Image (cartoon, rainbow, N blue to C red):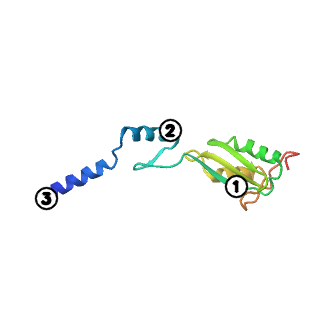
Amino acid sequence: MKQIILIALAAAAFALTGCKSEEDKKAASREKETKPTFMFWNFRKEIVSTEYHIPEMKKPTAAKYLEARLRQIPGYEKSEADLETNTLTVHYQSSTVRSMNFEEAIALAGFSVNKRPADPNARIPEGVL
């Protein structure tokens, strides 16, 4: 008999861990629009950012060229270039694309990125560098 009561109490405690107030449920549903559920009431960010170091990116034309190339990747949101530090910060949807996809696109565009060499066959348009 004690075992049945103990099991029932454990099951009730487990079930109550997922209970939320109406306000919490509304906030969670708003959060799900931008952050998909990960597992067991945990959430992960949907829009994340990664910073890429691109030594050859010294002019605004190079930054615009790379941003135009990255814009074609599904899941790309936006990016900011910092010409002083030669970095490009890319914001993207983590459920759609991974950071290595952007690194690959930058290398295929003809720029070395994060100590990864540029594609030797890439043709960079005149005036970009």
Q: Secondary structure at mark 1?
A: strand
In the displayed structure, 118 sits above or below 68; it is: below
Q: Are marks 3 and 2 in contact (CB under 8 Å)?
A: no
In terms of sequence position, does the residue under pointer 3 or pointer 1 come before the other?
Answer: 3
Bin the neighbour count of mark 3 within 10 Å (Cα to Cα): few under 14, some 14-19, many 20 and up: few
Kindly identify the amino acid type of the residue bearing the numbered disc 2. Answer: Glu
Can you give x and y, in whole percent of width and height, for residue 33 in the image? 50, 38
In terms of sequence position, does the residue under pointer 2 or pointer 1 come before the other?
Answer: 2
In the displayed structure, 71 sits above or below 89; it is: above
Mark 3 to mark 1 CA distance (whole Å):
60 Å
**Residue 33: which numbered mark, if any?**
2
Residue at the image position 40 percent from the left and 48 percent from the top: 41
Q: Residue under label 3, please give it.
A: 2
Q: Nearer the viewer, residue 73 or 35?
A: 35
Kindly identify the amino acid type of the residue bearing the numbered disc 1. Answer: Tyr
Question: With 52 as the anchor, is 15 left or right in this view?
Answer: left
Q: Residue under label 1, please give it.
A: 52
Q: Are marks 2 and 1 in contact (CB under 8 Å)?
A: no
Image quarter (top left, top right, bottom left or bottom right) of the N terminus: bottom left
Q: Quadrant of residue 24?
A: top left
In the displayed structure, 26 sits above or below 124; it is: above
**Residue 118: which numbered mark, if any?**
none
Can you give x and y, in whole percent of width and height, for residue 125 in the image? 85, 45
Can you give x and y, in whole percent of width and height, for residue 116 in the image? 72, 60
Question: With 78 as the anchor, is 3 left or right in this view?
Answer: left
Mark 2 to mark 1 CA distance (whole Å):
28 Å
Residue at the image position 29 percent from the left and 48 percent from the top: 15
Question: With 28 as the anchor, is 102 left or right in this view?
Answer: right
Kindly identify the amino acid type of the residue bearing the numbered disc 3. Answer: Lys
Residue at the image position 82 percent from the left and 53 percent from the top: 58
Bin the neighbour count of mark 1 within 10 Å (Cα to Cα): few under 14, some 14-19, many 20 and up: many
Q: Secondary structure at mark 2?
A: helix
